[in-house]
Image (spheres, rainbow, N blue to C red):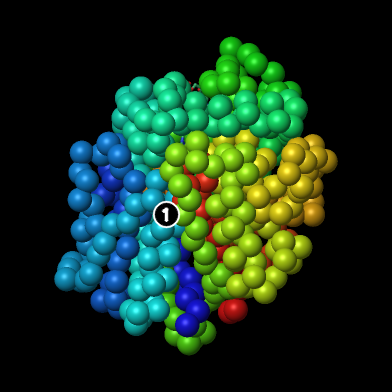
Amino acid sequence: MIACIVGWAHSRFGKLEGETLESLITKVAAEALEHAGIGPEDVGEIVLGHFNAGFSAQDFTASLVLQTDDRLRFKPATRVENACATGSAAVRQGIRAVDSGARFVLVVGAEQMTTTPGPEIGANLLKASYLPEDGDTPAGFAGVFGKIAHAYFQRHGDQSDALAAIAAKNHKNGVENPYAQMRKDLGYDFCRQESEKNPYVAGPLKRTDCSLVSDGAAAIVLTDTTTALSMRRAIAFRANEHVQDFLPMSKRDILLFEGCEQAWAQALKKAGVTLHDLSFVETHDCFTIAELIEYEAMGLAKRGEGAKLALEGYTAKDSKLPVNPSGGLKSKGHPIGATGVSMHVLTSMQLAGEAGGIQVPNAKLGGIFNMGGAAVANYVSILDRIR
Ligand SMILES: CC(=O)SCCNC(=O)CCNC(=O)[C@H](O)C(C)(C)COP(=O)(O)OP(=O)(O)OC[C@H]1O[C@@H](n2cnc3c(N)ncnc32)[C@H](O)[C@@H]1OP(=O)(O)O
């Protein structure tokens, strides 16, 4: 059975004053059901993606979705977590529920990060790393990717120009995304130069090489193909693959993102397509170096040559393969548990031709890569509009 997305909702991402985790969850849940044209009574199963790791005092959160409407009472609801790929883990669990016979499945991803004091944010995020073996990591998760960038530069040369090009591209794309946290075209020169407003954060990574700290939520409604074809819109999963790798970076060649490579290979094979068939890709640019390595791991460039794609503009919104037309985590924001669900929402919008200013013309097939840790949890979806 092929699961389909038939409704969706997305909150603004950013520092959302006056919101709570509960209000974020219930708003997108209600909006997604309405968008799908179904009622709470039609929901067969609920999955919540929520990372937490200390961002919220409430850690038993699946039932918060039931606060949306009394008619959700007694529905099965479960929270899933897989670090920064938590949203995609929830989507995959939702697909499993459809495969097991649930007619409509409500998948919500949510996180509230900005109410946590600065130093604690880094410490919470580092819980998705493997500290005992990988050694002390200052600067939170940026420290982990700072080490990766440093090692990449040692192997393949200084790629600061390419990283700045990726940052500038994603910030430019985000300007037209109404859900994005930072809608400023920062420009290549600002992203390239160290400055008071763009200091080094970790290793060769500057502030503009990092994704944002965000609050936000997103939701989708899933159903089976037969039901989906009788509804307003139907976005089908041509593939949905999950590859989990070892946690310690010392057990892998960390510059290869082999879990990402494997997940893309499996997904493309399952969908029976190549990268050239995709209209666009939303990929996990938690740090610009991640997007660069992902170009290579997905097979778009040879190892060590990802920079060329960034510098030649191959992945720009109006070019061969737009990557992160939404602005990516870089400018859209990265509320951990919501990110993977957000990628599925924005890809569905693109395929439905409902993406407004970020619309990729004639988008037919969309690819998604969402990652937890440093290529530890790897999820690839390939989505296709069938109605
Ligand atoms: C596998 C994974 O997904 S791991 C990823 C997990 N996520 C992360 O690790 C989050 C990484 N990002 C961060 O920790 C933070 O954004 C940092 C450290 C880069 C910057 O935080 P701070 O230095 O505290 O910046 P602060 O919040 O004080 O903002 C200062 C200015 O920089 C801007 N800014 C903050 N973060 C960013 C960013 N990532 N990119 C661009 N601009 C930024 C702000 O808008 C603000 O601008 P203003 O002065 O014009 O108002």
**Quick one: SS at disc 1?**
helix
What kind of residue is marked 1?
Gly
Q: How many marks?
A: 1
> For the point 50% across and 30% down, which residue is it?
144
Q: Which residue is mark 1?
A: 87
Residue placed most toward the observer, 107 or 204: 204
In which quadrant will I find the C terminus? bottom right
Is 342 on the left or on the right of 99, as rendered?
A: right
Residue placed most toward the observer, 207 or 269: 269
The residue positioned farthest toward the right in the image shown: 312
Q: Whole-percent x and y of residue 321? A: 74, 54
> For the point 66% across and 32% down, which residue is it?
152
Rate crowding at label 1 as few (under 14), some (14 to 19) or many (20 or more) other CA atoms within 10 Å.
many
The residue positioned farthest toward the front in the image shown: 251
> For the point 59% across and 66% down, which residue is it?
267
Residue placed most toward the observer, 126 or 8: 126
Residue placed most toward the observer, 45 or 217: 45
Q: Whole-percent x and y of residue 264? A: 61, 59
Q: Whole-percent x and y of residue 174? A: 61, 42
Q: Whole-percent x and y of residue 261? A: 62, 54
The residue positioned farthest toward the top in the image shown: 196
> For the point 55% across and 63% down, which residue is it?
381
